[in-house]
Image: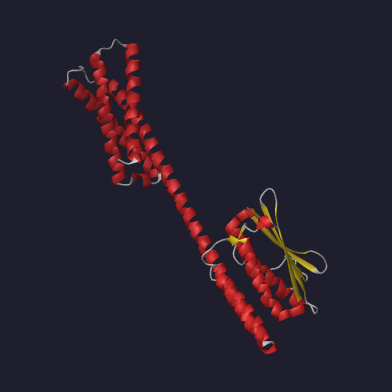
Amino acid sequence: MTRKQRAYWICQAGGWAFYITLNFLFFRLSYHTNIKDLLNYILWLPIGIGLTHVFRFFIKKYNLTRLTLTAQIPLILFSCFVLAVLFFFLTIGMAMGLGLISYHINLVNSTRTILDVSVIFILWSIIYFGFHYLENYKQAEIQNLKLEANSKEVELNTLKSQLNPHFMFNSMNSIRALIDEDPVKAKAAVTQLSNILRSTLMIHKNRLVSLQEELALIEDYLELEHNRYEERLNYSFNIQPDTLKCQVPPMILQTLVENGIKHGISKQPRGGSISIHTSLSDQGILDIKIFNTGQVRNEQGGTGFGLINTRQRLHLLFGDNASFKVTNSDDHTVLSEIIIKT
């Protein structure tokens, strides 16, 4: 017997026993009772349980809990009236057959009794159908959450899959520029690129990576780009040690660094610099700031591929617990900032 079935039988026995006990106590307060009266009320217990259990069988067989409320209400009322009639005649018939009572059918009293018992069956039905309604609602809610989670997972994978070809294109351009200028550096750049690709191959397997892993990827990428830009590109890190274990989406900082070089530093005749600062507050708020030479011309704070991808991924993974913005820090510097509540 499952836990659910055991709970059902406990509720059945307990509910009917409670109803019968109340009836017997009220009857005893009004009339003189004897052992036959007690046995007569005890006889109600198996009849009540049996009738409601048969009713439950038909509910499950015809899947009545799935019907609309407008269809359920008249069906419940009619079924409860039929059950009350059966309960009345079964209890009277069996009690008379066992010699516990002598009963003369009175239409008014019999109708009143049947209507009183109908209320009990209606109450039983409300509890039963109400329980299944809540259970179905909960299952539907869980299913919707699963579908939403699957939808988010598909969207995340789509966004991540967009990063690899985008990143590869820019990296290969960097190496191509070095081939004619400095073949030795180009060979070293290929080695650096292979190290980066080893990390990016894991992007589809992990929703989050440690900040330490992400910074290692960025350092390899910056070394690769430094071979291309030489003295026109300088970079630095200011990393708070306790932030290294914080979890971030893979390649999310690399995308911003790449964006800063492509749209900021590369457009400056003298090049520029890029620096990354991280901090973790006592409230567990991770603050990542990326400064790069350049200026944001778009009033919306950037709408390029990398920035849109970053916003979407943060929203899917963290919801309102993460924010991202791109602003002009001063007349010569752009600030890209990610805040995550860990």
Residue 172 is at least partly visible in this image: no
In which quarter of the view is residue 200 placed?
bottom right
Find the residue positioned furthest to the bottom.
180
What residue is at 26 percent from the left and 17 percent from the top? 38
166 left or right of 298 in image: left
The front one of 43 and 113 is 43
With respect to residue 231, does 334 lie above or below? above
With respect to residue 53, does 237 lie above or below? below
The front one of 71 and 289 is 289
What residue is at 60 percent from the left and 55 percent from the top? 319
Q: Quadrant of the N terminus?
A: top left
Query: x, y (%) of residue 273?
Result: 76, 71
Find the residue positioned furthest to the right.
331
242 left or right of 20 in image: right
Query: x, y (%) of residue 274?
Result: 74, 69
Query: x, y (%) of residue 68?
Result: 40, 46
Query: x, y (%) of residue 192?
Result: 62, 77
Q: How many marks?
A: 0
In which quarter of the view is residue 102 placed?
top left
What residue is at 67 percent from the left and 70 percent from the top? 219
With respect to residue 266, does 154 lie above or below? above
The front one of 267 and 19 is 267
Residue 167 is at least partly visible in this image: yes
Find the residue positioned furthest to the top.
32
